[in-house]
Amino acid sequence: MTVMLVRHGRSHANTSGLLAGRTEAVSLDERGLEQSVALAARLRGVPIRTIVCSPLLRCQQTVDPLAQELGLEPVPDTRLIEVDYGEWTGRPLTDLVKEPLWAVVQQHPSAVVFPGGESLAQVQARAVAAVREYDRALAEANGGDALWIACTHGDVIKSIVADALGLHLDGFQRIIVEPASVSVVRYTATRPFLYHLNDSGSDFAHFAPREKPGAANASDAVVGGDVPR
């Protein structure tokens, strides 16, 4: 199964320097709305079976043009919601960098529990569980590989990618996920493969599922460094 992890487009909070967190009213700005339309164009012709998204407005707005074009109804899932930053929610980033916890977030995120909120370890656990659950369900429903969208938030995507790479959560700050970017992970019986990370310009038509007679097991990494399909 192949999941396209889409970060929501640029929001008003992104440009104001505030940590939006789970603030419900945060919407895409003009650039973010343009990015949502561009996302639909980039994925035109790609056989996407399902769109799952964080229930927050900025994610719903991001997938709306794509959902309309595909005739799909996005499925909201709270396991893909933004990190609960607790008392940090809504505060300026310029203030948060002065907090002692900021250094821990940067260097040892696996140890972070946001005051009045959740831990980054909890975020990774719920997000990865959701992705793998949808993968299994779609594999059973489609009799094999299928493409689907998970539209969520930056730190959530970073935690999913870190898991796919077998990277300790303390290393997830090395991963960059920008607004409206697409990161692609294909899950197999034995390992995930990361195909794209923080991608803002590729044509994804080559991800249409297909059979390759005589090909190696889909779970195998191809000897010689080729790309498994």
Image (cartoon, rainbow, N blue to C red):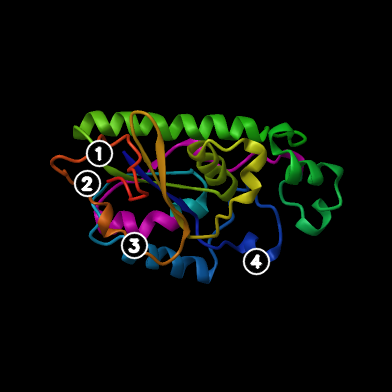
Residue at (25, 34) in percent of width and height? 217
Disc 1: which residue: 145
Q: Circle 3 is placed at which residue position?
A: 40
Q: Which mark is residue 51?
A: none
Query: Does 34 sit left or right of 209 as displayed?
Result: right
- Residues at discs 1 and 2 in contact (Cβ within 8 Å): yes
- The amino acid sitting under disc 1 is Asp
Disc 4 to disc 1: CB gap under 8 Å: no
Of 41 and 74, the residue lying toward us:
41
Where does residue 113 sit, x and y in percent of width and height? 73, 33
The Cα–Cα distance between marks 4 and 1, rounded to whole angstroms, is 38 Å
Distance Cα–Cα, label 3 vs label 1: 21 Å
Residue shown at the point (32%, 34%) measured from the top left: 219
Mark 2 or 3 closer to N-term? 3
Rendered image quadrant of residue 222: top left
Relative image position of residue 65 (x, y in whole percent): 35, 60
Q: Which residues are magenta?
A: 61-87
Badge nearest the viewer, 2 or 4: 2
Residue type at mark 3: give it: Ala
Q: Does the image show residue 135? A: yes
Contact between marks 2 and 4 (CB within 8 A): the answer is no
Quote the CA–CA distance across marks 2 and 4: 38 Å
Is 83 covered by the magenta stretch?
A: yes
